[in-house]
Structures are given as structure tokens and as C-alpha cells.
Amino acid sequence: MAMVKVSVLLIGILTGLVFGNWVDGFEEILNFNETAASFLDSEHMEAFGASKAARATDVLMVGLTLIQGADAKGAVCMDGTLPGYNWHRGYGSGANSWLIQLEGGGWCNNLRSCVYRKTSRHGSTAYMEKEIAFTGILSDKAGYNPDFYNWNRIKLRYCDGASFSGDSENKAAQLQYRGQRIWLAAMEEFMSKGMRSAKQALLSGCSAGGLASILHCDEFRGLFSGNTKVKCLSDAGMFLDAVDVSGGRTLRNYFGGVVGSQGLKNTLPRVCTDHLDPTSCFFPQNLVDNIKTPLFILNTAYDSWQIQSSLAPSSADPSGYWHDCRLNHSKCSPAQIQFLQGFRNEMLKALNRFSLSKQNGLFINSCFAHCQTERQDTWFANNSPVIGNKAIAQAVGDWYFDRTSVKAIDCPYPCDKSCHHLVFRQA
Ligand SMILES: *[C@@H]1O[C@H](CO)[C@@H](O)[C@H](O)[C@H]1NC(C)=O
Ligand SMILES: *[C@@H]1O[C@H](CO)[C@@H](O)[C@H](O)[C@H]1NC(C)=O
């Protein structure tokens, strides 16, 4: 028992450290550098039972493939390198089914943060790991991933800085903002590798990738004929246009920088930009009601990234009142919890109309976490988070295969005892 507790704590801490790495552009949250980050990524994996010895045999490692010829289409990473993906081929009953998981990893919002990003694994395939672990929704084991384990599973790597949606450049700074072209070149590549004859397809992604799966959902369906079952899943992509603890709009200001520096007004969904400003159209709450393709929204009601970076960042908390609560939810005062309940209410309100549509799915659990599909412990495990006894993998599978309707909304914190909360290192 003591062992279990220690390892859960360790997972929380390591995840916290790794997680900090996604928060490029929000460096004030955790001190970080890329060397330390990639070291911790492997530590992180081992914390999930993939010891060094087991890694080769148990956890599937999948190599990076570059999209040859993408540069001729102007589809390049921020530094001009070819974009890439990791693909594990489907087999058996999954041979004609395709899961595309869009990688997340924050954004850059100004020249300084984009120049920095260009020489990191989120801005260049030259800096990416040569292979990555496929776990959770990417796992190849039926026991870990009951519905998608034998599908073609692809992780499309994120190297454009704006959720796969830019199409511009900053010549003077030698920065390419080509997310939209990367998206298109990747889809052409997958079509040519067999996705063209897919019977089933699911576009997914987490964090900045979860936002991208919303932004590209209808485009994705448009690639297929009416005979293909196409749906989309957004994990931790429900970034709210929320008021922070000082009454400001930290995330709106930040997204304004992303949208402005990459000139996204031309590439964001026109059904939104024709009546709202482009920054608003980077917020899913202004997009999800108009998506025609069946969409599943998975998010925690107390998204730990949003608490740290949008609601209570240190820039909005000069007195440090939120410091301890930001890093560890059990240190929040009743007033702070009440503020966070307000955020949950906003989340539910933003999804109200969306949830009325029969084809959509919903799983909003009352946990302090961010991204639950790619981690084995949150996707599907003996003690993974549940709502009404249903784990996330089961909820998503039930919805995708139309076994049951899934509109799962948890009771407010602290009622859920199945959470895997993230607890961050004291900075
Ligand atoms: C980054 O972290 C590594 C490993 O901890 C360390 O050796 C290196 O000096 C750090 N670099 C910077 C710029 O802080
Ligand atoms: C989080 O806070 C609780 C309550 O103060 C404490 O018992 C626990 O050890 C803290 N966790 C970490 C990882 O600091």
C-alpha cells in the first residue's frame, strides 16, 4: 500500500515536471529546459511501469517518419525541416480503420517564444525523439486499448506552433508558420498509404492537438466519402475564454498573440470568422456548436493546465495567494475552490448546446488533470478515472461505435474518488 502511494505521488510529480514542458510561452510556471524535459520524458514513461528492461518488449516504441516532398508544398516545421509522424500499422479487423492523433505541446505567441520554439522538439523534427512510446489510445494491446489497439494509429507531430492552423512566414526571423499546409500534406500522405479506403476514421488529439482536432474536424470528414464512419475526439482541448483571478483575460491575450503572430484570421473556420474576431475563433466554445461531424469532448472540469496558465498564472497573482493551490489542489482554500467551481460551471455552460446533439459525446470528469487519452493510467487501467463505472476508453468506444450515447458529466469536486490528479513540484 505504501509503495502504491509513493509511486502515485511520483507519477504526479514527474508528470508535473513533464507537463511543464508543454507550457512553452508560459515559462514562469515552472523553470524548464529541453534537456531536462527529454530526460524526464523517459522517467515519466518508467513511472508507468515501463521499466528500461520492459520498454523494449512491453511498451510499443514507434519510429519517426518524415513526410518526403512536403517541403515542395511549403509544408514545413518552423525551422524549415520536414514534418513527421509515427505510424503503427493496423491489422486484422483494424486494418482498414485509422486513428489520427494530433500531437499537442502549447503554442508560441510572439517573436521571442517562436524563435525559441524553432530549436525545440515542438518546432523542428531535427529536435524530435527518434522514436516514441505508444500508450493509452495509441497502445497496441487489447487489454490496454480495447477498441483501437489494432487500428492504424498515427501520431502526427506538432512543429508549427499554432495547432496545425497557420499559413504564413516571418522571413526576417526565418520562421515558417505552416500548420495548415502540414495538416494537408499529412492527410495526403496518409491517404496514399491506405487511409483513402478507410472504413472507419477518428481524428483525435490532446491539448493544443485537442484544439486542432476541433479546428480540423469537418475538414477531416470532408476527405472521405459517405461510406466511411468519421468522428473526432478532443482531449483537453476545451480552452475557455475565461476571466483570471485578477479579473483579466490571460488566455485571451495569449491566444491573441498566437493568432496575430501567425496571421490565423485567414485559416480559422470561416463559419466563425465571418461573425467573430479571429481570436474568439481560436476558442472552442465558439466553434463546437457549428461542427457537423460527430465530436466527443473529453476534458476535466478543473483542467490543470488552464488553472496554471489561464486562471491563476503568477502574472495574475502578484501576491502569491494562488501559489500553493495552483500546484496542489488539496492546498486550495474554500474560496479558491469556489472560484474553480465557477470555472466548471462555465465549462458546462459552454458545452450546453453541444451536448444536446445526439451524435456528440461528452466526458467531463471532476479531476485536476490535463490530457487523459495518451496516458495508460488515465485511459484504461484497473484504477483509471471513471464516471459511473465507465473508464474513458470505454466511454469513447461506446460513443464511437454507437453502442450507447455518452453524455457523462461528473458531480463537482471533491466527489470523484477515481481521479488521477496532477500535483506539481513546488517551484
Ligand atoms: C538544462 O538542464 C540540464 C540537465 O539538468 C543541465 O545540464 C543544463 O545545464 C540546463 N541548461 C540550462 C540552459 O539551464
Ligand atoms: C498536496 O497537499 C496535501 C495537503 O496539504 C499534502 O498532504 C500533499 O503531500 C501535497 N502533495 C504534494 C505532492 O506536495
Image (cartoon, rainbow, N blue to C red):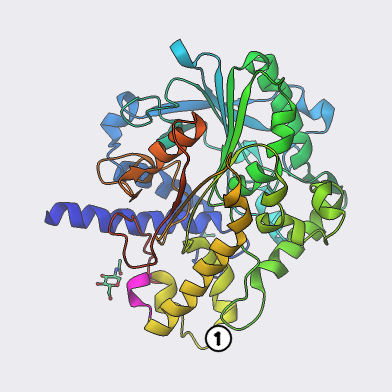
Res. 155 image quadrant: top right
Quadrant for the C terminus, please: bottom left
**Which x, y percent locates residue 164?**
71, 43
Q: Residue furthest bottom?
A: 319
Quadrant for the N terminus, please: bottom left
Res. 330 image quadrant: bottom left
Nearer to us in this view, 178 or 330: 330
SS class of the residue under badge 1?
loop
User: What residue lies at 46% left-to-right and 43% top-to-bottom?
Assistant: 406
Res. 358 image quadrant: top right
**Span shown in magenta:** 328-332
Relative to residue 359, is residue 26 depicted above or below?
below
How many dots with numbers?
1
Relative to residue 183, is residue 408 depicted above or below?
below
**Residue 284 appears left or right of 145:** right
Residue bearing the label numbered 1: 318
